[in-house]
Image (cartoon, rainbow, N blue to C red):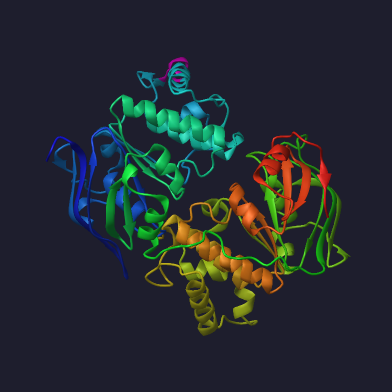
Amino acid sequence: MNNEYILEFDRVTKDFPGIRALSDVSFKVRQGEIHGICGENGAGKSTLMKIITGVYPFHSYQGRVIFNGQELMFTGSSIRKAIEKGIAIVYQELALISRMTAGENIFLGREPNTHGIINWHELYSKTQALLKQYNLFFPFSAPVGKLGVGQQQLVEIAKALSENAQLLILDEPTSALTETEVDTLMNILQKLKQEGVTCIYISHKIEEFFRIADTITVLRDGKTINTKKTGQTSIPEIIQMMVGREMKERFPKHEHNFKQIVLEVKNLTAFHPEYPEKMVIKDISFSLRRGEILGIAGLMGSGRTELVTTLFGEYGINISGKVLLNGKPFIIHSARHSINNGISLVPENRKEQGLILNQSIMENISLPNLIQFSNAFSINKHEEITTCQEAIKQLTIKCGTLNAEVNSLSGGNQQKVVIAKWLVSNPMILIMDEPTRGIDVGAKYEIYKLMIKLASQGVAIIMVSSELPEILALSDTILVMHEGCCKGILSYSEASQERIMTLATGYGECFQNT
């Protein structure tokens, strides 16, 4: 192998029951470069990374993977062996132990010890030195469960950095980060590049490649489409290679046409379920109409998720204020109570809150909807299968069979399964918390079209999103939050990125247009 390259994929092919995930994938990664990999959900990105990191043994796929001049031939699940060879990965889905501190998570399994007794002083000294080296800022001696999602993502990144890897793989590293945290990550990658570390950077945010990557490889349907120098391509060209067609517009056209009020929230206040003295929702009021898309904007930790999960009956305690559903008092009671009253929630964290990973696609879609397929004695399997097949077709979920485990799907297709099961429930109000997080550009467009179609049919939608272009393009009305408060409610015609950010950062006068 040419010493110019640290990693080479040579005709790598990988099959799962009923589906080919990778087909003759071939490309090379130069030593010391930042190499971007992009593609739609199901393109094979995650499968490829699991091969590199030893999750899939070499006898389970065809072709060769060469690292530092030697073929990788991992047997069994060899994640630790991959780390020993100098390969570390930060997965899109967090793998932290919530009750352990950040420092304990970073050095888990590698704790400094003397005769089996952990040296806690050394562990936290190493943690502090690591964070200082890379300008990372989060409370490393607090349980990670008390940290925000963005800070937990930084813990995962710190954990990978502590391995002193030659090859660092980052899978959707900025999906939960604030702009400031993204800047920090970009600086870290530049520092690692100067130190000779090679990075593979996977993201659905294509603009990030043009900010940080030297080279971009595009995968589609498990195949290598092309590898190009970043300076020799463009965002439209990358998108066209990803989806196999030219996309002339990022967002579908949306007519702002909504009807009578379906939900009224008046002076809603709620407290943290684990820390009852902490108020998380503070005196929030808004209304929602049939056919309306209400976007909820705000920075990480502003209370967006706390608001929608409280309304769904799954979060806040000591709730006060008034909620009216179709003009009648609605008592926030439980998720089942909300579902029975026509309210559904696509949660922010699909793996922990939205799916049962070791069950099949059909079982996940059916679970909250079994009453539709059953009578007092049995389940109508034909109706269940037909309904699930229609949902899969509607959302273009890439899978071999209805009976495939959800855990075998890519992250984006898992997200589509979550959305599918709530569409089957035929909701009157559909709450979608970060519905396109981890979704590729082509699938995003399909989700946007689906949301607009549902709204045109009279479904009222509440959408939480960290992407301001998404909020501005899809919302009829925008509620902006800061520190648990509603700082303003804007109509689509008066909203702008600058106006939203002014409110989201706590500046500007509080106002409402309802």
Q: Which residue is painted at 52% across and 62% down in the image? A: 445
Q: Nearer the viewer, residue 108 or 222?
A: 222
Q: Which residue is painted at 51% across and 29% down in the image? A: 102
Q: Which of the image's four quarters has the N terminus? A: top left
Q: Position of residue 57 (x, y in %)?
A: 24, 51
In the figure, is residue 480 to the left or right of 417?
A: right
In the figure, is residue 336 to the left or right of 173?
A: right
Q: Which residue is painted at 74% across and 51% down in the image? A: 494
State which region is magenta.
118-123
Q: Is residue 375 above or below residue 175?
A: below
Residue 356 shows up from this direction: no
Q: Nearer the viewer, residue 124 or 266?
A: 266
Q: For residue 296: magenta?
A: no
Q: Position of residue 104 (x, y in %)?
A: 47, 28
Q: Position of residue 144 (x, y in %)?
A: 55, 33
Which SS does the magenta portion mostly show?
Answer: helix
Q: Residue furthest left?
A: 1
Q: Which of the image's four quarters has the C terminus? A: bottom right
Q: Is residue 444 above or below residue 166?
A: below
- The quarter of the picture where residue 2 lies is top left
